[in-house]
Image (cartoon, rainbow, N blue to C red):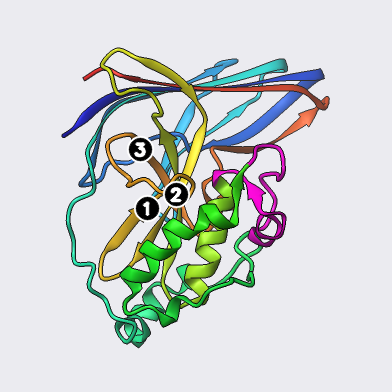
Amino acid sequence: MAWRMRVTHSTSFQYESEVSASFNEARMTPLNTADQFVISHELKINPFSTVYNYQDYFGTEVRAFDVQTPHTYLEIVSQSLVETKGPAEGNLNASWADLTDQVLTDELLEYLIHSELVDPIEARFDLRALPTPLDAIHFLNSAMREQIKYAPGTTSVYSPASEAWEKGAGVCQDFTHATLSILRSAGIPARYVSGYLYNGSGEVGEEVLGESHSWVEAWVGHWLPFDPTNGNPVAEDHVLVARGRDYHDVSPLKGIFSGGRSRKTEVTVSLTRIA
């Protein structure tokens, strides 16, 4: 069943003294896919700035803008209306031997190697001992919450997978990075996915406050999305925004500025199911 949701993602910065200029990239625009349709999207900048659109290497919609007017306050508000549904059925029957095909490994190499945030970790189990890659994914999706407990404040956005794994605690980003590390070590191509998760009752008209969320897509003959943070299927309640190798590729907002230090940052995300 399809859902229609309104998503508002607001970020504001207050500076200690006047900023003469800032240059920014926003990755807050939901993607059009076979499972998701973007009805409308608007990015509002205060102070006003012209926004330039492009698609990055991984297919994410990027909104780039620079503010040349001196300012002590910057606000970015992304408003989207999007229709979502559960992922389409696909071929998920790849064998371990299929994943060693040279053409496939060359094509998906970026999702098979480790990175600064997806660093190697010592898993307490061997995914390759399971009959198929799909079996390995189902097992790992269940096992992750036994290895990492959801605990905000124990890590940062720059924490690698190994830190959360050693602490046994983290947030959705850490669950995702650790899952990617284990999958890639087992030879299963896997990529980082960011977006939003509606965590309400599902009643039409209900607005819920949330934050950016992340999950995993693994290649097992077809890209299979799953959410290791909560173990639930990726379905109508997930809004897809960006894909990449790790969080560095999908950060909702990044940029540089010239002037006073940032004094206060506020981020709010709200999702409303409207149909």
For the residue carrying disc 2, how many other residues have a C-alpha within 10 Å: few (<14), some (14-19), or many (20+)?
A: many
Q: Which mark is residue 215?
A: 2
**Whether label 1 touches label 2, CB < 8 Å:** yes
Q: Gap in Å between the C-alphas at discs 1 and 3?
A: 10 Å
User: Mark 2: which amino acid?
Assistant: Trp
- Element type where label 3 sits in the image: strand
- Element type where label 1 sits in the image: strand
Residue receiving disc 3: 238
Q: Position of residue 184 (x, y in %)?
A: 49, 72
Q: Which mark is residue 226?
A: 1
Residue ID at (64%, 19%): 74
Q: In which quarter of the view is residue 136 placed?
A: bottom left
State yes or no: residue 125 in magenta: no
Residue ID at (45%, 63%): 140
| Residue 7 appears in the rendering | yes
State yes or no: residue 166 in magenta: yes
Which range of residues does the magenta coloring cover?
151-172
Viewer-closest of 178 and 13: 178
**Whether label 3 touches label 2, CB < 8 Å:** yes
Q: Position of residue 90 (x, y in %)?
A: 18, 61
